[in-house]
Image (cartoon, rainbow, N blue to C red):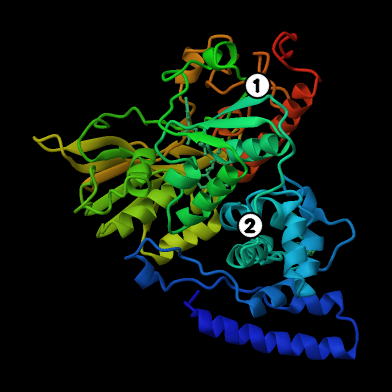
Amino acid sequence: MSYRTPEELHKAAAALLAGIEEKRAQGPIRNKDRIAIPQQEMPSQDPLERRGNMQEVTFGYSEEQALVEAERCLQCKNAPCIAGCPVTIDIPRFIKAIAERDFEGSISVIKEASLLPAICGRVCPQENQCQENCTVGKSLKDPFKSVSVGRLERYVADLDRATGGRSAPHVKPATGKRVAVIGSGPASITAAADLRKEGHAVTVFEAFHRPGGVMLYGIPEFRLPKQIVDEEIETLRQMGVEIRTNFLVGRTRKLADLLNEDGFDAVFIGTGAGLPRFMHIPGENLIGVFAANEYLTRSNLMRAYDSDHADTPIIQPRRVAVLGGGNVAMDAARTAIRLGAEEVNVVYRRTRKEMPARAEEVDHAEEEGVHFHFLESPVRILGDENDRVTGIECLSYQLGEPDESGRRRPVPIPGSEHPLAVDTVIVSIGNDSNPLLMKTTPELEVTKWGNIITDDDGRTSMPGVFAGGDIVLGSATVILAMGQGRKAAAAINTMLAGGAGGPGTEPTEQ
Ligand code: FAD
Ligand code: SF4
């Protein structure tokens, strides 16, 4: 698709809107006509320009675009989109409010179900959730042409932020109960807010020097401006939540100490899945090999791209190989481009169709010049006499029968080894949970992958201790983590009000 400037898109939307108004003056707009309204493209920075900066790639809809896009919604009675939303936002209702230019009403509908709409409107994989089920996409036989629910959510959330609508939620009178929240990602932010609203004293313990979890140190600025995450944290502070950074539970204090010595009545664990997986191939310890997490954290949180001032600058990459095909791989590849790499190659052992990354992110990466090597996987990383990376040796693959995930299994082609010259390798094949907390808390039951086992409401095997987000689900999504934080907070609130699950009660049946 050729690049269209924001001005061109806004102008086209204004013309469409005038046509829609004219039609409406003649009578109600029929579904057939709504389906024929073209989907509004997201305005974005020119790919050639954005390669060289860290600023957000997309600008968000103009008012005209939002109004046109809202007109595409059929207001389906059965609202299949809601069933695809992990926090069941009343999607037709918030879109109807946009179409009626009631933007305040629209954001309040979203806020009934979601605490972080400006974030979710940017990073939720809507194409696999609400938009996958949308009647418009189904009628057009193209899920990517569904009503752009996420972009509309972002529009009203940004408008709300710009007009100062983000007042801190009401907090009930103090209950005298104290809750510790471990980690400060979306699961913890949601849990902390819901617990504080009930009047409990809430303390968030975060291992890093800045709160926000992966939204801060993983997802890059060009996809999710850090100011938005900081604003959410500020709201927590305004509500009276205490945030203690540089506090690693398991080392600074043990989890049991929080309950037994420090006077907390309940604990929520939202420590995420921050331990990178490696490929276990020769050469992974060479200089120039990074885990995607480290690469992104150093760039996002420690501003390693600022080589004149950063304490831990990253070596300027020239030719980069990113191993993996998920969102994290796309973020690492696009970060490497912005750090000045001349060539960035994503090496993935299946095809584009099987890539777990969001299609939009793959498109953006391609527009920015990232090369894709499908049906290839490295067998070793090559280095020179100084132990610096000089390349990778790849094996070619073909697709075989589907595996347990339903995706066709990649089968290696014997004798197909071939080199790819690179000086930097970024391994991005997934994350596991950090074992520290579990090792120092043997009472917590975990799966063989180290994820905490909980019941549907987030209760763990330890009385008074709840968990949610990636530490329970494995690497998942922001919205799923939020949903889990909300459920666990509800269960903690019930427990603190005298219901089940507190210290002294029987552990959960697993
Ligand atoms: P996290 O966000 O991981 O936060 C956990 C926090 O706990 C961290 O701040 C960590 O420092 C802290 N912590 C860990 N152990 C301790 C301890 N012992 N004591 C104190 N603090 C501790 N999802 C999407 O929906 N859309 C996307 O586009 C998307 N892109 C992603 C890109 C990248 C690069 C990554 C890594 C993930 C992405 N995800 C995306 C996934 C999403 O960010 C996670 O699913 C989500 O952040 C999980 O939230 P969480 O609250 O469970 O934990
Ligand atoms: Fe609107 Fe699509 Fe939801 Fe129907 S399924 S109400 S068209 S967003």
Left or right: where 52 falls relative to 473: left
Left or right: where 485 falls relative to 414: right
Residue type of the residue flagged with mark 1: Ala
Q: Which residue: 52% across, 79% down? A: 6
Residue under label 1, please give it. Answer: 266
Q: Which residue: 50% across, 46% down? A: 215
Between 411 and 332, the residue placed more toward the observer is 332
Disc 2 and disc 1 in contact, CB within 8 angstroms: no
Image spot of residue 507 (x, y percent): 71, 11
Left or right: where 164 falls relative to 213: right
Q: Is residue 380 above or below residue 261?
A: below
Residue 442 is tagged as none
Where, by quadrant of the figure, is residue 135 drawn? bottom right
Q: Is residue 140 above or below residue 124?
A: below
Where, by quadrant of the figure, is residue 473 drawn? top right
Task: Note whether ligand 1 is within 8 Å of mark 1.
Answer: no
Task: Note whether ligand 1 is within 8 Å of mark 2.
Answer: no
Residue 166 is tagged as 2
Mark 1 lies on a secondary structure that is: strand
Q: Label 1: how many residues lie within 10 Å, few (<14), some (14-19) or many (20+)? A: many
Residue type of the residue flagged with mark 2: Arg
Between 445 and 336, the residue placed more toward the observer is 445
Between 380 and 301, the residue placed more toward the observer is 301
Q: Which residue: 84% across, 65% down? A: 75
Left or right: where 401 falls relative to 249: right
Image spot of residue 360 (x, y percent): 53, 60
Say whether residue 374 is visible: no
Mark 2 lies on a secondary structure that is: loop
